Image (spheres, rainbow, N blue to C red):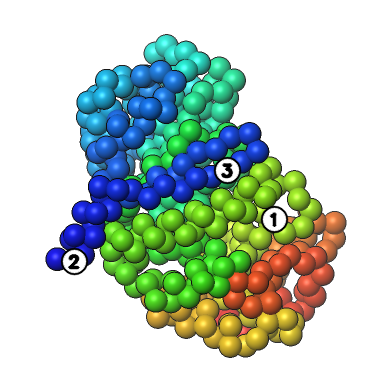
Amino acid sequence: TTRVMEALALSRRPLRLPVVLEKSRYDVVIGADLISRAGALLAPLLPRRSVIVITDETVRPLYLSKLLASLEETGIEARSITVAPGEQTKCWTTYEDVVDTILEGGVERRTAIIALGGGVVGDLAGFVAATTLRGLPFIQIPTTLLSQVDSSVGGKTGINSRWGKNLIGAFHQPLCVLADVSSLTTLPRRELVAGYAEIVKAGLIGQESLFAWCEKHGAAVLARDPEALAEAVRQACAFKAGVVAADEREEQKTDGRALLNLGHTFGHALEAELGYDGRLLHGEAVSIGLTLAFSLSVKLGLCPQEDLIRVTRHLESLKMPAHVSDLPYRFRIADLMAHMQRDKKMQDGKLSFVLAHGIGKAFTTRDVPEEAVREVLLADGV
Ligand code: NAD
Ligand code: MG
């Protein structure tokens, strides 16, 4: 009953996390049952009582009618556009279809775009908002844990090119983000775990207290306890908002936003090897990448072994992917190294990594010996 009462309190009074940037500021509103109160929450922010909701076929039957009903209650006129779920949706063809549909239906510069869905919908809808009529107001209603803690903060929007992921895009900050933790009840567990890995990552980068909180409450987060979810989302968003505020457009040469890539160099190599076909989710790859980044840091004598043990123990205790050997796929060391070397070319010929001096003490470096990387991968089961 305490649980139920806490959940009720949370649904009555959502948490508000301000994101303060050079030229704009907005709130990430975090709580339970926000979609059914979206009209009241958004009405004061909208330049005009007219919105276009972009969602995907999976999210549509779950949450669209709830959102539309709430918008209607407050006199906000809304129409919706539905795209196919999945990463392939972040492409020129879908982008063109969506923009054409918007223009065909009539739109003016004060009509807002609302993204209702995961990071795919958020990135696509955000790019549509950034570019249609040179910029429409934008609102995010992220419905995956990953999009609540990661992609909805920072203002990056975009689509993929045949040459790589997220190569076409724009910075476009939202007016507001509504992170409704109740929407996570329908999220498949694998997707939940993948989002949670980015929360753990935030703690490991720069906030030991967040990682310690995860050690205590991670099980409750994965059990979808609404209080634990809201607190995890708040802490991870606060962390990312701080990093983004200090380096809004990724212009800093060292650290800054680059730290957010802890675990990602290894993770991307694993994902790329499997051809981004859904067998390995991004967050699952990051989870393994975190262990590898700490192993590499230990191998180079930069990080105490105890911190690596703490990281792996936490991931293992929640049955998260922690080692390459946890995956039912075989990788060839040469292929993984080749992927990482391709990154290396982009970085002036040096192998660049985010490493850690310990939990909460990540830093970027540009001179990691290839041999150490190879040994760490081999020791992890490649
Ligand atoms: P996603 O949007 O593909 O969602 C994952 C799956 O869950 C989809 O099938 C979706 O339909 C479904 N889904 C969404 N909400 C649901 C719910 N409440 N219940 C049941 N099913 C639901 O994936 P994602 O992990 O949310 O986002 C990944 C994308 O985010 C990638 O394209 C990545 O590049 C991008 N991203 C962007 C940023 C940024 O800063 N802009 C940061 C990180 C990731
Ligand atoms: Mg990531």
Instruction: Examine the rendered structure and indicate whether residue 337 appears above or below residue 77.
Output: below
Residue 141 x/y as whole percent: 39, 40
The one of 224 and 48 positioned closer to us in this rendering: 48
The one of 253 and 119 positioned closer to us in this rendering: 253
Q: Is 90 positioned to the left or the right of 247 in the image?
A: left
Residue 256 x/y as whole percent: 69, 55
Instruction: Give the number of the mark in front: 3 or 1.
Output: 3
Q: CA distance from mark 3 to mark 1?
A: 16 Å
Instruction: Examine the rendered structure and indicate whether residue 45 appears above or below residue 105.
Output: below
Q: Which residue is mark 2?
A: 2
Q: Which residue is mark 1?
A: 256
Query: At numbered mark 1, what does the secondary structure look like: helix, strand or loop?
Result: helix
Q: Quadrant of residue 303?
A: bottom right
Q: Which residue is mark 3?
A: 20
Q: Residues within 10 Å of mark 2 (few under 14, many from 20)?
A: few
Task: Indicate the amino acid at tag 1.
Answer: Gly
Q: Is 216 positioned to the left or the right of 21 in the image?
A: left
Residue 147 can be seen in this image = no
Q: Residues within 10 Å of mark 1 (few under 14, many from 20)?
A: many
Instruction: Examine the rendered structure and indicate whether residue 244 appears above or below residue 129.
Output: below
